[in-house]
Image (cartoon, rainbow, N blue to C red):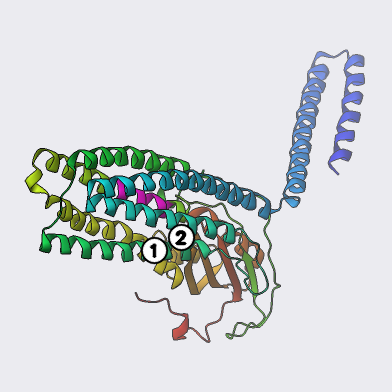
Amino acid sequence: RERERRRECVEWRGHLSFLTRRQSQPVGLQSHRRMKNDVEREEEGLLQKENRLAKSYESIGAASNFHCHDEEERKGDESNRRAKRTLWISLTICLFFMICEVVGGWWAQSLAIITDAAHLLTDFASMLISLFSLYLASRPASRRMSFGFQRAEVLGAFVSVFLIWIVTGILVYLAVMRIVNGEYEIEGSIMAITAGIGVCVNLVMGAMLYFGGHTHSHLGGGSHGHSHGGHGHEHGEEEEGHRHSHEGSESSSSGHTHEHSEQNINVRAAFIHVLGDLIQSVGVLVAALVIFFFPSWSVVDPICTLFFSIIVLFTTIYIMRDALVVLLEGRPSNIDFSLVFQSLGEIPGVQKVHDLRIWALTMDKVALSVHLEVAKDAKPQKILKAARSMLRNKFNVFESTVQIENYTTDKSDCEKCDPPEH
């Protein structure tokens, strides 16, 4: 129809041009010129509208070819490759210096140096576990393991922290025995040299893990990114007379979102281990200098072992807490339950929100499921897409399942539909 109108405008333009050339009256000429200008403006408007329609059709065609798995898998693979490379380099440095510290600690008869070496041994074991977890997590999902092995890295971080607690407990016992017995001699110069090298090595390893382990995106409020256009995988169909038992509902399951992660969890665990090593190495260096200048103060060595063992416990307890939250399917601390609930209820057409479930699939991947009751005259697919887009872009939800239901007042007093109080 637009093209027919355009052809009519062209014909009128030619007709008016002919009349203009034949017109001898000045008034008639001005009238025809005004008509000619009107036709030209209308023709220009039609051309602009046709161009907009063409661009719209082109964008629709591009969106129909979009598949949201591609970008997510590419980013996940890139993040894992970077984490593996960082861990392998740190693992090599850790092994080399651990051997040096064992030799130096044995030579200097310093329990603090041996403590630092044992801590490095735990770091070495934890990095091996982390690498194994990353390789295991990269395996595809199966019918039995529908989420794949995403939580393998969480389990690896849990085991590595547990190991460091065991080693720390043993070293605390040895330090107490040294204080009680008081029979030991320490070479302050060798201890100081070894501790100084340890500070430098831990600084290098810490910088490598911190800057090398970060991905392009960031967790929580400091996040940035871009949303994925196009369509997702939406399944289901609209049902009339929906029962409260949720039969015949429309649902959409999506696991396709822009990932917002601070660091890979295993790189983060390794970084905190190295941070504890750095603090401990600084303390050992101070103790070594004290013993070097005041040999009678050798009791500083076991005291430093006790003090820095406590610091190690405090630096690892947060990783243990986060790992337990994931394994118990708790809500991540960076997601506000009330805000998600309120945002879903503010979507146009949504009458009621219930059965909202938020849990951590891994440290940096959030999963969510929810039921939305909508008005009868609402468009379920439109609400479905709005909910998925909001969850993905505003809350960085990795895996979301949204179930659309017809709103009914018969079950408005259902206690199971009420949100939890705490």
Q: Crowding near pointer 1: few (<14 within 10 Å), some, many (20+)?
A: many
Task: Kindly identify which numbered label has been placed on residue 322.
Answer: 1
Determine the residue positioned at 69% across, 68% down: 235
Say what amino acid the circle numbered 1 marks: Asp
Whether residue 413 appears in this view of the structure is no
Q: Earlier in the sequence, mark 2 or mark 1?
A: 1
Quadrant in which the N terminus appears = top right
Q: Is residue 36 visible?
A: yes
Please name the residue shown 89% across and 35% down the image: 8
Q: Nearer the viewer, residue 53 or 218?
A: 218
Q: Is residue 298 magenta?
A: no
Q: Quadrant of residue 287?
A: top left
Residues drawn in magenta: 268-278
Mark 2 surroundings within 10 Å by alpha-carbon count, few (fewer than 14), some (14 through 19), many (20 or more) = many
Residue 275 magenta: yes
Principal secondary structure, stretch drawn in magenta: helix
Q: Secondary structure at mark 1?
A: helix
Tell me if label 2 and label 1 are in contact, CB under 8 Å: yes
Locate residue 119, reporting x and y percent.
33, 54
Instruction: Say which mark, if any, is on residue 363.
Output: 2
Circle 2: element type: loop
Q: Is residue 261 left or right of residue 258?
A: left
Quadrant (top left, top right, bottom left, bottom right) of the C terminus: bottom left
Find residue 405 and report its horizontal and vertical position in percent: 60, 76
In the picture provided, is 136 more to the left or to the right than 332? Answer: right
Distance from disc 2 to disc 1, alpha carbons, whole Å, reads 7 Å
Q: In terms of image quadrants, where is residue 15?
A: top right
Left or right: 421, with 365 as reference point:
left
Q: In the rendered picture of this protein, how many numbered marks are placed on residues?
A: 2
Q: Is residue 261 above or below residue 249?
A: above
User: Mark 2: which amino acid?
Assistant: Met
